[in-house]
Each structure stands twice: as structure tokens, then as C-alpha cells.
């Protein structure tokens, strides 16, 4: 979460004040300012934050391990937790490796979808 806040704050600070002044002169209200000035400048940073947060949630393991250890019952069991249990509790390294590759492929597929959405909007500005 802190990285997302820093990235979005940096993106907000990059928006030229002149755009807001010009929109106000043209009679734009707060919703029009957000929709036509703020959001277009935040679209790419929002997608980057979305990519990073989604991919980190897919691979979430440490919070589950520390707080619930997969419980109660199997309520918080995820694919990463199942990979850990299969590999180290059951000592089935082959199936654990297959789970790990599945996590990698899911992560790659979601990242590719997000990148396609990101680059559809035009050139990426650094």
C-alpha cells in the first residue's frame, strides 16, 4: 500500500496546474475537472499500481502463514499456501513444483492482460 500511495502522489504532483486553470476558465466543475484533467493523467499510474497490487495479492503467502496458517479449516487456503503445504508438509516436490509453475503462469497471464490495457491507451510516459 505505501508504494501505491507514493506512486499516485507523484502522479498527482505531475499534473500541470495550468490544465486546472484552463478548465475552470472554460466553466468546468469539480466532476469535469476530475473526469477530463485528473483521471487521464492518473490512468497509467493507476494501471501500474493495479498491476503491482494484483500480482502481489496472487502471490500472497507471508500474511496467511503468520496470521492464520491456512485456517480456520481451509478458509484462507490459497494456491501459494497449497503449494507450501504440498511441497513441505507432504514432501511432494513434483506437485509442489507444478503448483509453483501454475502460479507463475497465472501471474504472467494477468500481467500481459494489464500491459495490453496499458499500452492500448497510447505511449507510456516515463
Image (tube, grey):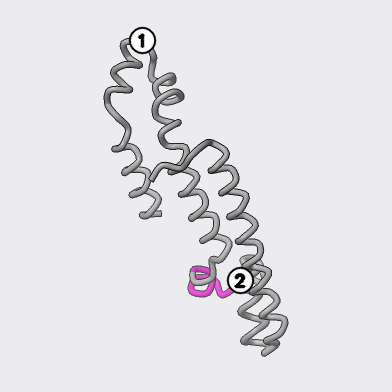
**Residue at position x 61%, y 66% in the image:** 76
Q: Residues within 10 Å of mark 2 (few under 14, many from 20)?
A: many
Q: Position of residue 39 (x, y in %)?
A: 44, 31
Q: Residues within 10 Å of mark 1 (few under 14, many from 20)?
A: few
Helix, strand or loop for disc 2: helix
Determine the residue located farthest toward the front in the rendered image: 123
Name the residue carrying label 2. Answer: 80
Q: Nearer the viewer, residue 30 or 46?
A: 46
Q: Earlier in the sequence, mark 1 or mark 2?
A: 1
Q: Nearer the viewer, residue 112 or 51?
A: 112
Q: Position of residue 37 (x, y in %)?
A: 40, 25
- Which quarter of the image is occupied by the N terminus? bottom left
**Residue at position x 65%, y 69% in the image:** 79
Q: Position of residue 67 (x, y in %)?
A: 50, 70
Disc 1 to disc 2: CB gap under 8 Å? no
Residue interval drawn in magenta: 63-71
Instruction: From this view, report whether residue 4 is shown above or below residue 73.
Output: above
Name the residue carrying label 1. Answer: 26
Asked if the magenta segment contains residue 5, the reply would be no
Q: Is residue 69 left or right of residue 99?
A: left
Determine the residue located farthest toward the bottom in the rendered image: 91
Instruction: Give the CA separation, mark 1 to mark 2.
Output: 52 Å
**Number of numbered discs:** 2
Label 1 or label 2, whichever lies nearer to me, is 1
Q: Nearer the viewer, residue 103 or 69?
A: 103
Q: Position of residue 62 (x, y in %)?
A: 49, 72
**Residue at position x 29%, y 29% in the image:** 16
Helix, strand or loop for disc 1: loop
**Residue at position x 61%, y 53% in the image:** 112
Residue 36: mark: none
Amino acid at each position: 500500500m505505501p508504494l501505491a500511495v507514493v506512486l499516485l502522489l507523484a502522479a498527482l504532483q505531475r499534473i500541470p496546474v495550468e490544465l486546472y486553470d484552463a478548465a475552470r476558465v472554460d466553466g468546468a466543475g469539480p466532476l469535469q475537472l476530475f473526469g477530463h484533467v485528473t483521471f487521464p493523467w492518473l490512468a497509467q499510474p493507476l494501471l501500474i499500481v493495479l498491476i503491482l497490487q494484483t500480482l502481489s495479492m496472487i502471490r500472497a503467502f507471508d500474511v496467511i502463514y503468520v496470521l492464520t496458517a491456512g485456517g480456520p479449516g481451509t478458509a484462507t487456503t490459497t494456491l501459494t499456501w497449497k503449494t507450501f503445504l504440498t511441497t513441505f508438509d507432504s514432501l511432494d516436490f513434483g506437485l509442489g513444483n507444478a503448483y509453483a509453475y501454475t502460479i507463475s503462469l497465472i501471474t504472467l497471464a494477468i500481467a500481459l492482460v494489464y500491459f495490453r490495457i496499458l499500452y492500448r491507451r497510447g505511449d507510456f510516459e516515463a
